[in-house]
Image: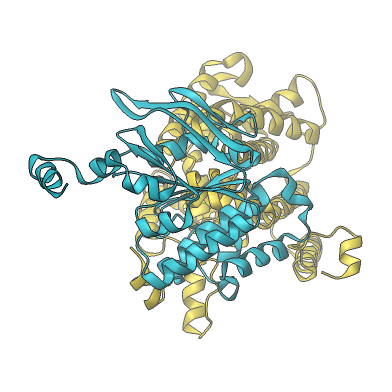
Chain colours: A yellow, B cyan
Amino acid sequence: MSVARARLHVPAWLSGRVLAGFAAAVVLLWVAPLVVPLSDYTHNIVGLTFMFMAAALAWNWLGGYVGQISFGHSAMFGVGGFVAARATLTLGLPFWVAWLAGGLVAGCYALLWGHPTLRLRGPYFSIATIGVGEATRLVATYWSGFTGGSSGLSLPIGQGPTKFQLYWYGLYLASAAVALSYWLRKSRIGLALLAIKEDVEAASDLGVNAALYQDIVLVLSGTVVGVCGGFYASYQAFIDPVDMFSFDRAISFVLMGVIGGLGTILLAASGAIVFVIIQEFLLASYSQLYLGLYGVLLVLIILFEPLGLAGLLIRARRRLGYRPKADVTVEPSPRAERGST
Amino acid sequence: MTAILVGESVSKHFGGLKAVDRVDFRLEDGEILGLIGPNGAGKTTLFSVAAGSIPPTAGRVLLDGRQVSGRSAHGSVHLGICRTHQIVRPFARLTVLENVLVGHYHGRPGNAGAGDPRRVAMEILDFIGLAPRAERLPGELTLAGRKRLEVARALATGPRVLLLDEVVAGLNLVETAGLLDLIRQIRGRGVSIIMIEHVMNAVMSLSDRVIVLDHGRKIAEGKPAEVAADPLVIEAYLGTDDESQQARAEGR
């Protein structure tokens, strides 16, 4: 570590190249719509994709880093969306304050159900989250005083950002999620999370406070997904409990993470791109069938490429003669096989 | 000498089974205490209680006068008591160095002030003899290597008391000798040690004192040679039947 770095308190894991690449990408995407002529439809869809990227990354903190697959993130998405919508409608707050309020309430809500359920691991946790998601959906549907019930809430047109402007807010959201992902992955917290994922008891025996770190990650994840819900409410200018809290909403977060690659950053984000493309294409052509097709897709990925896009990339690199880094794949050497019990 | 770790009438029952039954023990500062006994004697359970992983049914364990039993596993580590596992549990997808860093980052709170974490972790790996393998995955190590990694991680938490659960089990003679030497050096660094071991010459040569458990109860305690000659201990390990008693009687 150079003296200058130490003086600036730059952590060792933050390399200049990564920072420069990140800044360049954000600037490029910021000016792109001003330079490249895109149709309104494409422009808006890219904005929406940014939001889904942020949501996919936030889900991935729990699903990929800690290895706790949540089927209940629709709950925070919905809570964030409805709190933001209410904050705009009833309190007349500016849209970004409303989003933040939605995120904070969603984060608190995540802690409320997550603190007890995160003691479960693997499939037990996943099953519990299904219950949480469905219970939240039911409450939201019947609590018509807050959510408008089945008919939902319409946001006033003309207030807040237009769909066109939301592109940039989506970009900010996605950038923040990428930066947070990088920090979570590379800092000492990231190491604790990976240790928890591998063996929670062994991690505890080395002093890792597993309960605390899992809670932190879930609250962060829930908050960001809640903000995404607020963004979505602004984007659609209308939200209803079925759309926000439905089980396919919950599945969509899982799908994006799995398509991209659990535990990755940029690839998990690109999982959102693939997801949106598939969704737009399938929704337009087979609106009744798309959920079934998601199911088939999920099965195929798990069967043939459990690492998702990340796995495909590793394969491609290996074809090209690149030796993978120890981070992702495990190829035991002959000696290790002999030595194992 | 002063006691650093004291167990006061520690009991752990699983339903009707008294896995650990009113065991008292003292670990002196800088001591290596051997913990032996037949399979199922309750040795590992006693470790789990002392390390805070499971709460005792009755009694308590004190580290320097502060209660460590009944806390969380991580809470005990923060106070300075760390255990290793009989069946090694490395984090398979983290490198050897990262495995050690987990212990260093999340062990005792004082670790943060010890300087550049990677350098500290490398020093520990160097001491343990795994420095050349720092960037490898645990799966690429031999069993002896993974046993050493288990000890390195625990050492990285900065413990005052180290609980070693069968570190030399399954190793050949050369590997065992190397690891025993290492344990001696760890004691030399001011860490007090309790070791569970089935390899008798390992315990007998290394321990200052030995405690023998059988069916959850302490049946003997003392210098290794005294304990080895104790008839109760011999009975616990070899059992008694008419034939052997007869043989012993005739021998006398």
Tell me: B7 left or right of B197: right
Q: Who's the residue at 52% across and 65% down the image?
A: B181
Front in this rendered view, residue B83 or A24 = B83
Placement of A83 over or under A10, stated as above or below:
above
Give the image location of residue A191, x and y in percent: 62, 54
Placement of A85 over or under A336, stated as above or below:
above
Front in this rendered view, residue B45 or A135 = B45
Image quarter of residue B249: top left
Give the image location of residue A263, x and y in percent: 55, 56
Front in this rendered view, residue A235 or A186 = A186
The N terminus of chain B: image quadrant = top right
- Determine if residue B149 is in view: yes
- Outermost residue on the top side: it is A145
Give the image location of residue B125, x and y in percent: 61, 66
Image quarter of residue B240: top left
Placement of B40 over or under B136, stated as above or below:
above
- Determine if residue A123 is in view: no
